[in-house]
C-alpha cells in the first residue's frame, strides 16, 4: 500500500497550476495523479479515474463549473476525497460557504509554498486544517446566519468520552495523539469519531469542529 499522499489540482490558470504542481512534486511524500483546467474537467476525470486522490486542491473561480459547485458534486460522488479550497479572495463569505459544503481546509493563492505543504500534510494526517482566522469565522457564528438549526444542542446528546474526543479533534490532534491522551486505542478513537459523525450529522472531522464551536462545546480562546 502506497504511503504517498495522492492529490489532484484544479485551476483554470495554466501557469499557476503548473507552478503549483512543480512545487508539490518536489515533496517526496506527495504524488500528483492529474490536474484539471476547470471544475467540469476535474469531475469528469475523477469519474473515470482508476485511483481516486486523497486530497483535491481546487480553485473556486473557474469557467464551466466553478470550485464551489465542483466541491458539492465531489462531496456527493467521492466523499472520501478531501477538498482544499484555493482562492485569491480570502473573505468570510468564501470561507464560510466552502466549509459549509465540506471543504476541509482553505488556502489563499498568495500563501507561501511552506504553508501549502503544511496544509496538505495536516489534512492528510488529521482530516482537516483550520488556521486561527478560519476558526474565528466559525466562532463568530456566521454559519448560523440565515438558516435555522435542526435542533438545539442537548448536553446529554453526547457521552462523556465522545465529548472528550470531540474536544481533542477540535484541538487538531491526530487519531494516535487522541488515543495516547485518553489511554485508549486508535480503533476506539475512530469508533467514537464515527458515532460523533452520526449524532451530529457532520460530513467529516471539519464538520465536527463547526458543530462543536456553534454549540459552545469547545472554548477556543485558551489554545487557538
Image: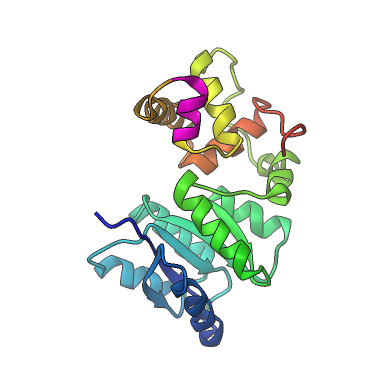
User: Relative to 151, does residue 43 appear above or below in the rendering?
Assistant: below
Please name whichever residue, 214 or 125, is drawn nearer the observer in this view of the structure: 125
Q: Is residue 181 magenta?
A: yes
Q: Is residue 38 left or right of residue 132?
A: left
Magenta extent:
176-183
Q: Seen in the image, is 39 located left or right of residue 68?
A: left
Q: Is residue 200 visible?
A: yes
Residue at (62%, 69%) from the top-left corner?
87
Q: Is residue 102 visible?
A: no
Name the residue at 66% across, 28% down.
Answer: 218
40 w.r.t. 76: above or below: below
Residue 102 in percent (x, y) is at: 50, 50
Q: Quadrant of residue 197?
A: top left
Say above or below: 19 vs 161. below
Tally of numbered tags: 0
Image coordinates for residue 95, horizontal then vertical, percent = 65, 56
- Identified at 65% across, 69% down, the residue is 112
Task: Please tell me whether the stretch drawn in magenta is mainly helix, strand or loop.
Answer: helix
**Residue 62 part of the magenta segment:** no
Amino acid at each position: 500500500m502506497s504511503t504517498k499522499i495522492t492529490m489532484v489540482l484544479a485551476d483554470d490558470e495554466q501557469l499557476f497550476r503548473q507552478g503549483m504542481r512543480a512545487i508539490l512534486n518536489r515533496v517526496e511524500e506527495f504524488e500528483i495523479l492529474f490536474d484539471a483546467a476547470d471544475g467540469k474537467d476535474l469531475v469528469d476525470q475523477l469519474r473515470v479515474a482508476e485511483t481516486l486522490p486523497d486530497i483535491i486542491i481546487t480553485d473556486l473561480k473557474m469557467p464551466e463549473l466553478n470550485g464551489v459547485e465542483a466541491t458539492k458534486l465531489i462531496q456527493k460522488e467521492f466523499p472520501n476525497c478531501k477538498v482544499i479550497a484555493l482562492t485569491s479572495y480570502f473573505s468570510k463569505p468564501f470561507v464560510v460557504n466552502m466549509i459549509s459544503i465540506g471543504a476541509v481546509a482553505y488556502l489563499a493563492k498568495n500563501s507561501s509554498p511552506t504553508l501549502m505543504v503544511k496544509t496538505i500534510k495536516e489534512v492528510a494526517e488529521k482530516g482537516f486544517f483550520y488556521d486561527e482566522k478560519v476558526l474565528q469565522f466559525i466562532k463568530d457564528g456566521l454559519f448560523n446566519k440565515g438558516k435555522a438549526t435542526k435542533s438545539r444542542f442537548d448536553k446529554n446528546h453526547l457521552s462523556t468520552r465522545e465529548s472528550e474526543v470531540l474536544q481533542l479533534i477540535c484541538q487538531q490532534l491526530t487519531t494516535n495523539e487522541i488515543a495516547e491522551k485518553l489511554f485508549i486505542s486508535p480503533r476506539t478513537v475512530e469508533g467514537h469519531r464515527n458515532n460523533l459523525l452520526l449524532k451530529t450529522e457532520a460530513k467529516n472531522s471539519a464538520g465536527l469542529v463547526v458543530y462543536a464551536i456553534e454549540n459552545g462545546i469547545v472554548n477556543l480562546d485558551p489554545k487557538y
